[in-house]
Image (spheres, coloured by chain):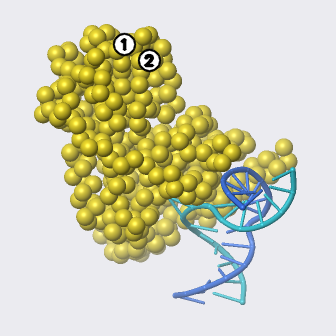
Chain colours: A yellow, B cyan, C blue
Amino acid sequence: MTSVLWFRRDLRLGDHPALHEAAGDGPVAALFVLDPALLEPSGAPRVAFLYRSLRALDEDLRSHGGQLVVRRGDPVKVVPEVAKEVGASSVHVSADFGPYGRTRDEAVEESLGDVRLVRTGSPYAVAPGRLTKKDGEVYKVYTPYHRAWKEHGWRKPATPIASRVDWHTGLNGIDIPGDPALPEGMDLPDAGEDAARKAWTKYHDGGLGGYGNDRDRPDLDRTSRMSMYLKWGAIHPRTILADLGPGDETYRGEIAWRDFYATILATWPESAREYFQPELATMEYAPADGAAFEAWTQGRTGFPIVDAGMRQLLALGWMHNRLRMIVASFLVKDLHIEWQHGARHFMKHLVDGDLASNQHGWQWTAGTGTDAAPYFRVFNPITQGQKFDPQGDYVRRWIPELLNVPGKAVHTPWELDAPPVDYPEPIVDHKKERLVALERYQAARAGRSSS
DNA sequence: TTTTGAGTTGTTCGA
DNA sequence: GTCGAACAACTCAAA
């Protein structure tokens, strides 16, 4: 009996449990639905990367005698239509645990009627719900979660079957749309499963060994950049995990973080918008519609390391992890702007923008999340720059106005005898704003304990 | 039930 | 320059 394989965040053919399930039923029709509800809030870089990933998937399918059918619309309508057209008795998917995805899937399941919606696998090594404390509750602290996660383990990658699948062809779909206009000069990495595997192999044989020591050095750029492939499932985390050795504990931990935050968001879907610790929502913040927020988004705060990160985001659709923390801390604790505004800006511009990791990364910085940073942990944008970009190479790469400032002096351009005229003065006094932030948090904490 | 130990990523200050 | 303490109490996880 024919089935539909509805692709979402699993745009690959290798190591794909839902494909194995579908193939066991008979012929498989491959479908992707362009859902306006998901596309509209996404920025051009992520949409472009999605389209390229879809083209790559279609190419891979064609090389195995199949094709990818792409339809536009609400999956609640589109998926049953396609199932009917091919006479499918089941629709196979990888489980989606996001706030929108889960509700959508329940609605699709309802609209499918007698056709079964079968969820097999997920984008995670250890899917939400698999791992609980002994009392059955969800872990809220990373470290014990991580311990249990390692103990629980994950499946080995499955053997490839795409060439043996009886692919259903002949359905009409729309062409994958042309890429939306990208910012001038933006150069996205190659998309698709093949590119993901190649990028991973290259990193595995090259930079991975130095990850533990150098991952915080944006000037050295030793992170794997697998996030955008993981975002769309061009590679599955368990494929990556299978290649890691005992010395790769730090890198393995990052995969665990991804699973952890997915679990948190799946358990508390409202934490995508609301404060995980609601009592901190009453804290006083500055409005996000002023010049300060604008300066932050444009990389013109006058703090070189902050501006370099923000400009890297605009230019690449990607930002080094250390910079994500620095610029987030600056927005929340120097400009006193709520984390949601920063999270939204990130989601708009990041190619790898993942709701769970993004929102909870921000909540961590804001001190409002699970396992949050202590309130007194305020990043100093000057010393962070000096520490993690010691020669200033990263800053100079992204801030042409500072190109001629040598060495670490680039982190304090206002101290130069002749500061560059086209680079802004610091928009705030960090020392002062740090104290303001500490007071705000202290007041909120006092409010909490008295209420 | 109670108790105990622990908690991603930092900074400043004073000795 | 280097080092340890203070920053603060609270919640979580597990015994």
Q: Is residue A208 above or below residue A317?
A: below
Q: Which residue is mark 2?
A: A108
Q: Split into 4 quadrants, where in the image is the N terminus of chain A?
A: top left
Marks 2 and 1 sit apart, C-alpha to C-alpha, by: 8 Å
Q: Quadrant of residue A349?
A: top left
Image point 23% across, 37% down: which residue? A161
Q: How many marks?
A: 2
Q: Residues within 10 Å of mark 2 (few under 14, many from 20)?
A: some
In the picture, the disc for residue A80 is: 1
Q: Are marks 2 and 1 in contact (CB under 8 Å)?
A: yes
Residue A97 seen by the camera: yes
* Residue A148 image offset from top left, x and y in percent: 56, 54
In the image, residue A247 lies at what x, y percent?
39, 69
Identified by mark 1, the residue type is: Pro
Which SS class for mark 1? helix
Q: Residue at x 84, y 43 (%)?
A: A451
In the picture, measured across the screen, residue A77 lies left or right of residue A205, that is right
